[in-house]
């Protein structure tokens, strides 16, 4: 059965030789996979693009869904043209995308995004070349992925809540936590606890693609992270951070993902001791924004504070300095409790202030993981950020309302903010069934 989700091309790196791929007339085109990509050889008899075809069949396409075909290619003769198609694999050969590219002598990455008019399991990915001279096209990293957000977000099967439920099936709270938390998509946080960041990100995004879901990731490894607070740590130097975020972005590759960039990093600028340190922090966030912008299917959102912390004009200035022009937008209320309507108002104010600074079109997302009861206690006072009592789960990850692009569970519910509030003995980032149950019950 043809796969509907994830990476629809099999053996796109040709590590299994030419398995899964067909070619045309052997007098005009032959395929060879020496272990690193594909060598497709056209003879002098192949005078036209359609003379030397090769491809893969049994591709499932759905009408109205957005797809992205990516591949890396070069040619033995610079200027060789390569026709890339995705479409119906039988008469009338209707194309969903039909693009001809010019190949240089060095590896070049191509990204072709399209919306399919076809609803079929008999789709085909094909490449064609031929120009009347002997030429070799070198091809690798062929991927066809569905990037339609409506397919839903990915729920981490190895979240802290999932691990706790698996280890404590007889606990009377397990069913409640499994139903309310484990099945819900949340952000997967990556930081200095990851020993091989590129491999770990790649594995997570690969799992999401295989499930046909969109992963939400949080990059949380800023140099001097949390300014020495409850979640201190991170990269040991600016140079180490730049290397880390480059590897993080490489792990995503050319697959769709939402990335929350360094929660609290810009909001805490004012707490850094010197102007040099503040400029360095903003520069590192901007470096991250640029690294992720180079990945065509990544939607990145910079730390945007929360509605009762930084004034909108000040937050906009920090976002602009942090490379907001390179990002999709910014994230509001990460690990906080402000209600969705309060956060929406703040998001619009920050977006307007950014536009006044020349950064137009910025979108915002809201962390709704714990904002079901808002941020005010029974006395009308704003609760403390760290494990306060009386909070409740908010709207699960979904398309946004009130101008927000998405409502997301960014902070993982049940994971402690630190040794504080109603969980003074639970370290930051550690799952607590006590905290989880309080969020589920709203007490």
Image (spheres, helix red, strand yellow):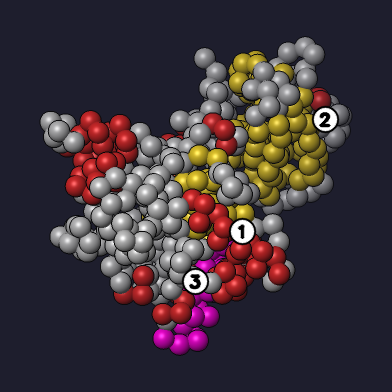
> Do labels 2 and 1 touch, CB within 8 Å?
no
User: Relative to 389, is 208 on the left or the right?
Assistant: right
Q: Residue at x 78, y 20 (%)?
A: 94
Residue of label 3: 310
Taking depth in this image into account, of 370 and 121 the one nearest to the observer is 370
Q: Residue at x 41, y 86 (%)?
A: 273
Numbered label attached to residue 348:
1
Residue 247 x, y percent position in the rendering:
47, 57
Numbered label attached to residue 49:
2
Magenta run includes residue 246:
no
The rendered magenta stretch, by its main secondary structure, is classed as helix
Magenta run includes residue 280:
yes
Kindly state the secondary structure of the residue where label 3 is placed: loop
Q: Quadrant of residue 418?
A: bottom left
Kindly state the secondary structure of the residue where label 1 is placed: helix
The residue segment tinted magenta is 273-294
Mark 1 to mark 3: distance in Å?
14 Å
Q: Is residue 135 above or below residue 248?
A: above
């Amino acid at each position: 059965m043809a796969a509907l989700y994830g990476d629809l091309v099999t053996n796109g790196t040709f590590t299994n030789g030419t398995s899964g791929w067909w070619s045309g007339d052997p007098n005009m085109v032959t395929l060879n996979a020496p272990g690193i990509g594909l060598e497709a050889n056209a003879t002098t008899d192949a005078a036209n693009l359609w003379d030397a075809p090769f491809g893969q069949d049994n591709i499932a396409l759905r009408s109205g869904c957005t797809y992205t075909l990516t591949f890396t290619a070069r040619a033995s003769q610079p200027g060789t043209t390569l026709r890339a198609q995705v479409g119906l694999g039988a008469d009338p050969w209707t194309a969903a995308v039909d693009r001809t590219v010019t190949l240089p002598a060095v590896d070049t990455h191509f990204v072709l995004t399209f919306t399919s008019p076809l609803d079929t399991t008999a789709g085909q990915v094909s490449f064609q070349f031929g120009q009347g001279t002997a030429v070799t096209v070198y091809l690798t990293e062929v991927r066809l992925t569905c990037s339609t957000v409506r397919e839903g977000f990915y729920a981490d099967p190895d979240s802290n809540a999932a691990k706790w439920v698996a280890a404590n099936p007889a606990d009377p709270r397990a069913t409640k936590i499994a139903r309310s938390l484990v099945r819900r998509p949340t952000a997967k946080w990556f930081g200095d606890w990851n020993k091989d960041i590129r491999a770990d990100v790649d594995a997570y995004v690969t799992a999401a693609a295989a499930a046909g879901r969109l992963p939400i990731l949080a990059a949380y490894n800023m140099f001097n992270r949390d300014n020495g607070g409850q979640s201190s740590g991170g990269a040991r130097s600016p140079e180490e951070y730049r290397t880390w975020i480059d590897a993080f972005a490489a792990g995503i590759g050319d697959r769709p993902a939402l990335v929350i960039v360094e929660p609290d990093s810009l909001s805490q600028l004012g707490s850094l001791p010197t102007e040099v340190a503040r400029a360095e922090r903003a520069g590192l966030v901007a470096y991250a924004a640029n690294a992720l912008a180079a990945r065509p299917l990544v939607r990145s959102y910079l730390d945007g504070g929360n509605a009762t912390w930084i004034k909108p004009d000040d937050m906009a200035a920090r976002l602009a300095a942090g490379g907001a022009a390179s990002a999709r937008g910014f994230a509001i209320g990460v690990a906080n409790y402000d209600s969705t309507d309060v956060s929406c108002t703040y998001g619009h104010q920050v977006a307007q202030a950014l536009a006044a600074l020349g950064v137009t079109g910025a979108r915002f997302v809201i962390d709704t993981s714990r904002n079901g009861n808002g941020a005010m206690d029974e006395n009308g006072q704003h609760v403390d950020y760290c494990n306060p009592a009386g909070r409740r789960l908010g709207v699960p990850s979904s398309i946004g309302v009130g101008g927000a692009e998405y409502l997301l569970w960014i902070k993982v519910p049940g994971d402690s903010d630190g040794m504080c509030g109603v969980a003074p003995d639970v370290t930051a980032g550690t799952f607590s069934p006590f905290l989880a149950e309080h969020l589920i019950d709203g007490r």
